[in-house]
Amino acid sequence: MKKAVYAMCLPVALLAAPSALLAQQNNVVKSITVKGTVEFTDPKSSSNIIWLLKDNFSGKPVVVDSCLLAKDNTFTFKIKQDHQGIYTVDALHWDRATFWSDADVKMDLRGYDTSFYKIKIPHYNYVEGSYDNNFINLMTLNGELNYRRMIDEYNMEYYAKKATDTTWYGYMKNTKKYNPMREDFNIREEVLTRSYADRPVLVYALRGMAGTEAGARYDKAMQLLDKLIARYPWLSEAKQLKQTIITNKAQAMKLKTGQPMPTVKYPDANGALAGLEKYKGKYLLVDFWASWCGPCRQAIPKVKELYDEYKAKGFEVVSISIDTDKNAWKKAMKEEAMPWDQLLSDNKDKTMEQFQFSGIPTLYLVDTEGKIMERFTGYSDDAEAKIKESISKGTKAKASQPASVPMTGF
């Protein structure tokens, strides 16, 4: 099944930065106060914990402090630092807000998800802070609205296809949009990055801009990163981000079309290690998912249909969960009753880094020789059509440039 959320993206107006702020390029705020409120707490927990994390741009934020939510649902942190950077407040592992630490900040978080059906989705919380902090506010809002529009468009297409009157579906498929979803997102991102091009907080955006594929966008992001490093020598996060990007690009080269699928072994439901080598000679769809991922679970019925249709033709599926709660994983497996092998990553962060994904479901189609044919972010009609075509035609992965590091396929 396809999924999608999304609300209309609205233009953002940017105020010019006061010249005094721009002049203080090397002023480092040594201490700030973080204050906030949480509206809803977890009714099943006797203690509601708030975490403070710092992003060091190596791939995973580090917890630097924590506290119990006060009886009046408030919290306070004091940050002492040798230079400003990017921090995130994590409320109960349900809500969060990210900010730039060059001034005191305030935030009001919703906290616990009170909906009947709970789902992990991007969060947008406005954080009161500095001019530079507003860059994160606006970037976060842009991403949130893009996600919601994606879901809306997916759902509209799904239900339009089910309708007996095909007028609306035909309009959706054949009418050129003024700005396609991704283009809309990029236009707003471009305005924001140009407006803050000389500010250290730009490092927040460069994580997403510098993808692993070579090209103009990647080159531009790396150039902006080099400028930040030269202009703000104290911004160690920029240096770390550059190294992380270079490392990720090298890993991504190992996952290009035609490269062997990395050899991995993960525990199954009984705790026994299992790999992918037994599928050589068959087409294999490797599905990275989690029990809490709504889009992942929406896709399962469609993958089941695909599996039933093509299993006799040499098609297999393996699901690899990145759940950190083993019981939740087992519960979801029982509910979904997937008739193929189920594995659980024993190190979520390492798995996401090795297979270069930040969102799920992410799926890899592997040919009969154990080589990567396609990578899909989300399960869509286009992804399904490509899988069916590959199996029906007996297609093999196209050769690509060899990776710089030797690898072993399965």
Image (cartoon, rainbow, N blue to C red):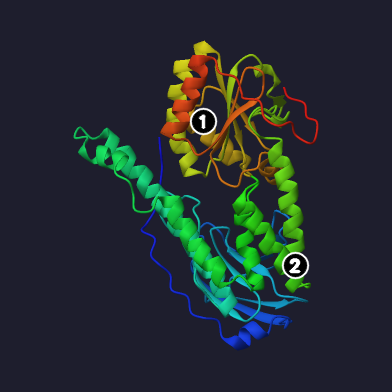
Which residue corresponds to the image point at 36% horizontal and 58% vertical from the top-left?
Answer: 8
Residue that numbered label 1 is attached to:
334
Q: Residue at x 52, y 44 (%)?
A: 292
Residue under label 2: 229
From the viewer's perspective, is residue 390 above or below residue 192? above
The residue drawn where x is 72% and y is 58% is 241
Amino acid type of the residue that numbered disc 2 sits on in the rendered structure: Ile
Give the distance between the C-alpha atoms of the residues marked 2 and 1, in whole angstroms. 50 Å
Rendered view: 313 above or below 207: above
**Measured from the top left, where is residue 388 in percent x and y?**
47, 21
The label shown at residue 305 is none
Quadrant that contains the N terminus: top left
Taking 127 as reference, is 404 left or right? right
Q: Position of residue 47 (x, y in %)?
A: 60, 64
Report whether residue 129 is seen.
Answer: no
Quadrant assignment, res 68: bottom right
Q: Earlier in the sequence, mark 2 or mark 1?
A: 2
Residue 255 in sight here? yes
Instruction: For the C terminus, give its image quadrant.
Output: top right
